[in-house]
Amino acid sequence: GGKLIGYVCYSPVFLKSTYDVSGYILSPLAVSPEYQSQGVGSALINSGIDMLTKDGVGVLLVYGDPNYYQRFGFKEEIGRLFVPPYPLTYPVGWTGMTLNAITTSGTPTKFDCVSALSKPALW
């Protein structure tokens, strides 16, 4: 009905690596309180995962409640491969998922993100 009930943003991350891996971060995700627990957030996330996968993106990262995001395939061990630009207040909330085949050395890779997310208070 033309009413905004949810929002998600997928922003690119810029890996400081010689590996040819493209990455994105899911941030932020919001759903109006009266529409929560009705699948809106899940639909937004799943749609984004589908689009990024079709676009050939290698990794998707998120910083949030691991109990929520694990149902979509986000894993702590993938998150550990990518070092956020700032120290994390809640390190357990840093997770990731591979969308397409990626090659890494297993050594954690640092990255930068878009300016809107480049604020220490957000991490």
Image (spheres, rainbow, N blue to C red):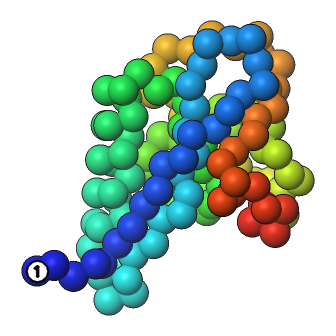
Task: Please count the marks in the image.
Answer: 1
**Extreme residue toward the front, this view:** 115
Looking at the rendering, in which quadrant would you find the C terminus? bottom right
Q: Determine whether, in the image, residue 8 is placed left or right of residue 82.
A: left
Residue 73 visible in this rendered orientation of the protein: yes
Q: Residue at x 36, y 46 (%)?
A: 48
Q: Residue at x 31, y 26 (%)?
A: 54
Q: Label 1: few (<14), some or many (≥20) within 10 Å?
A: few
Tell which of 44 and 18 is nearer to you: 18
Q: Residue furthest bottom?
A: 34
Q: Pick the residue in front: 14 or 35.
A: 14
- Quarter residue 118 falls in: bottom right
Q: Quadrant of residue 112?
A: top right
Q: What is the three-letter code of the residue carrying label 1? A: Gly
Q: Residue furthest right?
A: 87
115 w.r.t. 89: above or below = above
Residue name at image x 28 percent, y 66 percent? 39
Q: Quadrant of residue 30?
A: bottom left
The image shows residue 28, relative to residue 16, as above or below, that is below
Asked which secondary structure carries label 1, the reply is: loop
| Quarter of the image where the N terminus is located | bottom left
Residue 5 spot, x, y in % from top left:
30, 78
Nearer-the-camera pick, 16 or 30? 16
* Residue at mark 1: 1
Place of residue 57 in the rendered image (x, y in percent of width and height, measured from the top left):
47, 26
User: Percent position (x, y) of residue 110?
Assistant: 81, 32
Residue 75 appears in view: no
Q: Residue 69: x percent and y percent?
A: 52, 54
The residue that appears at 21% across and 82% down in the rendered structure is 3
Q: Is residue 100 above or below residue 90?
A: above
